[in-house]
Amino acid sequence: MTPTPTAPDVTVTVIVYNDAERLPRAVASLRRQTHANIEIVISDDHSTDDTPEVARQLAAEDDRITYLRLPENSGGCSAPRNRSLDIARAPYVMFLDSDDELPERAVELLLAAHRERDVDFVMGAVERVRVDTGRTSTWMPHLVAERRTVDGIAAEPALFFEHLSTSKMYKKSFLDRNDLRFPEGIHYEDQLFSAQAYCLATSFTVIPDPVYRWYIAPYEAAESASISNQRHKLTNVRDRIHVQGLIDEFLVSSGHTDVREAKDYKFLKHDFRMYAGDLPFRDEEWLTGFADIVNPYLAELAPGAYARLPRAERVVIRLVRDGRLAEARLAARGLGHGVAPRETTMDSAGHVYWGPYVPESPDSRRELDLTDLGLDSRPFPSAQFRHEITSVEQGPGASVVLSVRTYDPGLRLPVGPQVATLLIAPGRRRMKAPFRLDPVRPGVFEGTVRLDLAAAPLPLNGFAGTRHPVLQLTQGALRNTSLVLAPLTFPTLRARVDYRGGALPHEVTVEPEGRASGRLQLRWTPVGVTSRVIRPLARKAGAKAGSRVRRAARLAASLAR
């Protein structure tokens, strides 16, 4: 048991609701802090699982821990944070969610920055951890790359993009003086709270060190997913728009209208962009409801915010605003990947527009003008095509037959048949499947390719992972490689690939990606005794690079056939 001095330096609030399993991990990360003089408040939003028992046991183990239980469930993060602020004894406060952690030096580093300069809050880097893959990344890395003190948000309004309250240590007197608390009864409370903190702060310090570990579960069950992962609900869209309106009202009342364009840009680039990437996977009823919710707000945003977006994102937004929702779904599939539209139209002045006709309104013509993309003139390696798989069928053996349609709105490909190659690399070497694309009308080509999964050059130790084929076109010595869009739904195909050329048996699954652009997805899984025994041996052989061990692994694999 750790003795507690009379006055803690920092109060860290851990909010929890029905998370008895992960709460001990979050609290353990606080008990490991290199700066030990902290107060830990577990603020329970009236959990109905074993959380109360777990929290009381944790409090019994460490005098620094206080357990606070709300009398009824509030349904959000704000109330448990606010109730903890009411009893916090330290001059500095931080917030932690029960499914996340603080790195060991988080409190030490943030507190040191506070003591170095008199600022209203200090913010640091957030480490994101994918729970499905274990991969780590930094949230908004460009915003926290350099240590600095910022004299008010007007000096650096791009920081609106970093809207997490959990990445910051606040001076409690700053919060109390401004009566700054989390808004209760709404979702996306962090966005409003952080916007208010940015605007009210005279100065704040940014440090590049990681101070928060955020666990991301993108494929969590819908009923248990975080609010951010519930974008499939129109209520989620409505909540986000509501908070944006509250932020806008605050900017006016606090005299910060000068940063409105930057805040609008953040909404378009971050908030709207997340929904835009999901549009291909939504039905017509959802799309109509989405447009009804967002379009009135989109009409209020600063024109300069739109002008800062990439053309592809402006196209999606304009198609939504114009009610061309089916086309918005098509446009959204190419976001971030340089995918061309299926067709374009040119006006009498030579301007090229998205879709089959010239838009009527000046605003639509401005936003849907693709002339600056140079579809007909950019270098061939970066030329934009649109490759769509129109059908996926099981072929003989472990093969799959794909019907492919290529759209060439810039008419970059010469008239006549084209040689195309489907490329995929489950190991270090690529498998190539050449086929012919025949013209069916100007700017449109079709072909069929058979992908023999048994011919994939797998590594000796096998391959467990996912790959997405790409399509390559050539023009003389130049090559153009682009992603391939698959049907958004088709029956999953599976094939067993037996021992071949030293590679272990695998099961290969062919399926739609189900997210992002919706590419064709191939998933390899080692199977049988080889996956449990021989694959680890082969992996060890690859690491040692010893020819004798490699031969032994091949022999063992052949005996297991």
Image: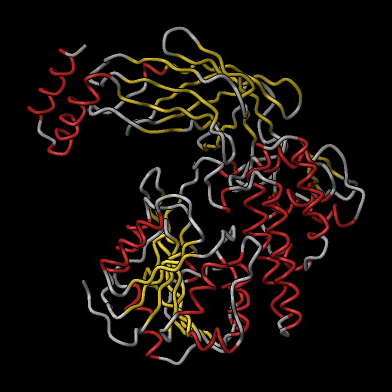
- With respect to residue 146, does 558 lie above or below? above
Residue at (41% x, 67% y) in the render: 42
Q: Is residue 496 left or right of residue 144?
A: left
Residue at (65% x, 34% y) in the render: 386
Q: Residue furthest front?
A: 71
Q: Nearer the viewer, residue 460 or 443?
A: 460
Q: Is residue 165 left or right of residue 252?
A: left
**Residue 518 image-quadrant placement:** top right
- Quadrant containing the N terminus in the rendered view: bottom left
- With respect to residue 407, does 454 lie above or below? above
Total numbered labels placed on residues in the image: 0
**Residue 200 image-quadrant placement:** bottom right
Q: Position of residue 494 (x, y in %)?
A: 45, 17
Q: Residue furthest top?
A: 396
Q: Residue furthest bottom?
A: 118
Q: Nearer the viewer, residue 511 or 240?
A: 240
Q: Nearer the viewer, residue 391 or 152?
A: 152
Q: How is the image coloured?
A: secondary structure
Q: Position of residue 316 (x, y in %)?
A: 73, 48
Q: Position of residue 208 (x, y in %)?
A: 40, 73
Residue at (28% x, 78% y) in the render: 35
- With respect to residue 384, does 312 lie above or below? below
Residue at (79% x, 47% y) in the render: 319
Q: Is residue 538 left or right of residue 126?
A: left
Q: Residue furthest left?
A: 548
- Quadrant containing the C terminus in the rendered view: top left
